[in-house]
Image: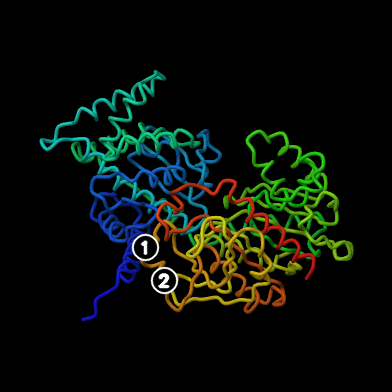
Amino acid sequence: MAIRTRAQESRAAIQRLYIAMRHLFLRGSYKPLGVSGEAMIKSLLLLKPEIYGSLADPEKVELSGLLYIFQRLPEGIEQCRFVNLIAREGLEKSGFVPLVPSKRRRDCYRVDDEQMYIEMTRGRSDIYDVLTHLTFMFVEAEKIRRNSFDYKDRPKREWVMLEGIVQKIENGEAFNEEMGYTYLSTILGRTYEETAAICEEFADSRKVNSLFEITYWLGKRSIDEHAHALDREITFSSALRENVGNHMHGEIWANDIKKYLLDNKLFDRPVHIISANMHSVMNTLYAKKIVGKRTSNKSLEEIAKVLSQSKSDHLQKKLVSYASANGMSFLKDGSGTNIGVQIFDLSKVDPKSVAKEVNWNKKYIKKNKPLLLVFDYPFGEQAYEIMDELLKPYDYKESKKLLNLASINIMGKAGILEGGKGDIMIPTAHIFEGTADNYPFENKLLAEEFGGNGVGVFEGPMITVLGTSLQNKDILRYFHKSSWGVIGLEMEGAHFQKAIQVATKIRKSVNPSADLRYAYYASDNPLETGSTLASGSLGLDGVRPTYLITSRIISGILNK
């Protein structure tokens, strides 16, 4: 009998985890430490994802992984016994104040001391992402409980002292932090140095409680369930179970865009779609005019770094005001997708405000008056929903109108498998993990366009994964070292390609000669210890690749 490789075992663990999540979602509820929850925990422990570091260690609490998930979950969720995943069901019109995590756009509502509602409007990937984070959180909570009691099941002194510190925090009283680190390090199974360093990172993070509070409440809820049968529970509303996969939010989002174009007599103009962030295109087109004197000789990277400084708020406001008066429109999202949209009328842009790295083509702009339709990053499977709806014919006065689509351009963040943070990847195909689906395409961006700029550039196939938080080195090494030759991983590429190919080959709603441009910059290298997503953001290291890609995309659009 053949022995399975570690990569094969890991792939099986991912499949079991997703099957379990789908089953629990359809069932409507589950208890994290019940039979179903334990099956998910077992699969996660077998998988040992890189982003969750010391997850499988029975004593050491994974510190960077905790910071990563709490930046993506609502503030105070560690205090709640009941977590309800819901669709958009009217809470946005209630008196509850929405809690939006700092690193993930989700509207969440704390309805009482023990219950949190989280709106899931971005598709299945969003649901799986939250469930994976919650499963990890419950594993770490059990470690905290075990570390807080002695062999006779009595609370250790460190736990009692931590409880006193949390009471002081709640009362706004001062306490000795260094003394607190010593108590906390015992409960976390970590050294004093590790504990003090991560506590500072928690303190610097927006919309995240202190590690003292998080550790205490994770432990307390675990103790309540273990000793007093006060079970924790996760539920999925009936509206969420009915709506997932129906493109309800994406359809509203796309129709709002098309209505705006019609209302402003822009619908028939050539449209170039760009999926990117909400600042790089705007900065490339306008920032030179705003940053200050003698900017004509400054590089786009230098200008962007000035705007990235903490003291640049006045410049940002001035920039948005100038851009809004010179061709930029911002469409506020009311659909629930949490995806912002900018529309740039290039015929209204002053060439003197455009970064020198852009090859500005006055003749093309004067003749065609092109539009750039820029939308913020979608999340996983949501990419298919919004691109599919955007490329559909628009029902207008008993007729169907098609966008005059000239190109589709995707700039994203991705994990790199060869190279390091800040390097650039140029995909030649997208492979969908766990399926036989693969999408080769002609990329109008070429690796040689990015040479000589101080960043590594890699060209080849990329894998679209089910969730970045589930990847481990064994699977990634297989895709990289085998004949697949994968250079990186991300979550949206295959979903975008699926929608584009449906539109071009089946619906015939998009001209098949429309250009496709894809480029990613490396936010992490999951094959390198200390370089996973949990190690922190790129910061200023991401400025150069972001603006290299942006300027090449805009130049390519204007000089086909």
Q: Count residues near mark 2 (Cα–Cα under 10 Å), then give few for <14, some for 14-19, many for 20+.
A: few
State the residue in front, 495 or 516: 516
Residue 160 place in picture, x, y as percent: 24, 26
Can you tell which mark lies on residue 306? none
- Give the residue type at disc 2: Gly
Q: Residue furthest left?
A: 152
Number of the front mark, 2 or 1: 2
Task: Name the side, left or right, on which 432 lies relative to 402.
Answer: left
Residues at marks 2 and 1 touching, judged by CB atoms closer than 8 Å: yes
Figure quadrant of residue 14: bottom left
From where the camera sits, is residue 128 visible?
no
Q: Which residue is mark 1?
A: 18
Q: Position of residue 132 (x, y in %)?
A: 38, 54
Q: Quadrant of residue 443?
A: bottom right
Q: 109 left or right of 43?
A: right
Disc 2 from disc 1: Cα separation = 11 Å
Residue at image point 71% right, 62% down = 552
**Residue 90 percent across, percent down from the top left:** 52, 43
Q: Earlier in the sequence, mark 2 or mark 1?
A: 1
Q: Which residue is mark 2?
A: 434
